[in-house]
Amino acid sequence: MLKSYIAFDLETTGLDPMNNEIIEIGALKVRDGKVSERFMEFIKPQELISPAITGLTGISKRYGRICSSRPFCYHRLY
């Protein structure tokens, strides 16, 4: 078993990586089997979030007020 790893969770506006966007990034840093750090950030998409994606993820346009820009979020994650 790995001693340390990072687990990522991504939510997107659809299933096509060429045409859809990441709208949420979650990450857990695990060391010796215990979570040592957490990261969760909403990312403001350029396209609208469809009702189907809202139904699947629970993420809707109302999150636009608390979203980060993509560059800012990626910088924070790094």
Image (cartoon, grey):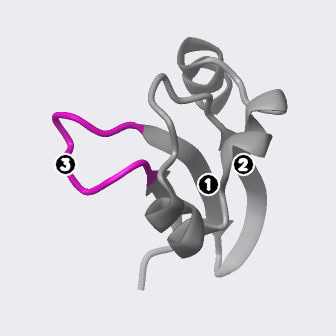
Magenta region: 12-21
Q: Tell whether label 2 touches label 3 (CB within 8 Å).
A: no
**Could you say which disc has been placed on residue 16 in the image?**
3
The residue most toward the right is 65
Badge 2 or badge 1: first in the primary sequence: 1
The answer to whether residue 69 is seen in the rendering is yes
Q: From the image, tell me which residue sits under label 1.
A: 26
Amino acid type of the residue that numbered disc 2 sits on in the rendered structure: Phe
Which image quadrant for residue 20?
top left
Q: Is the magenta stretch mostly helix, strand or loop?
A: loop
Amino acid type of the residue that numbered disc 1 sits on in the rendered structure: Gly
- Residue 15 on the magenta span: yes
Q: From the image, tell me which residue sits under label 2.
A: 39
Badge 3 or badge 2: first in the primary sequence: 3
Sort mark 2 into few (<14), some (14-19) or many (20+) by Cα contacts within 10 Å. Answer: few
52 left or right of 32 in image: left
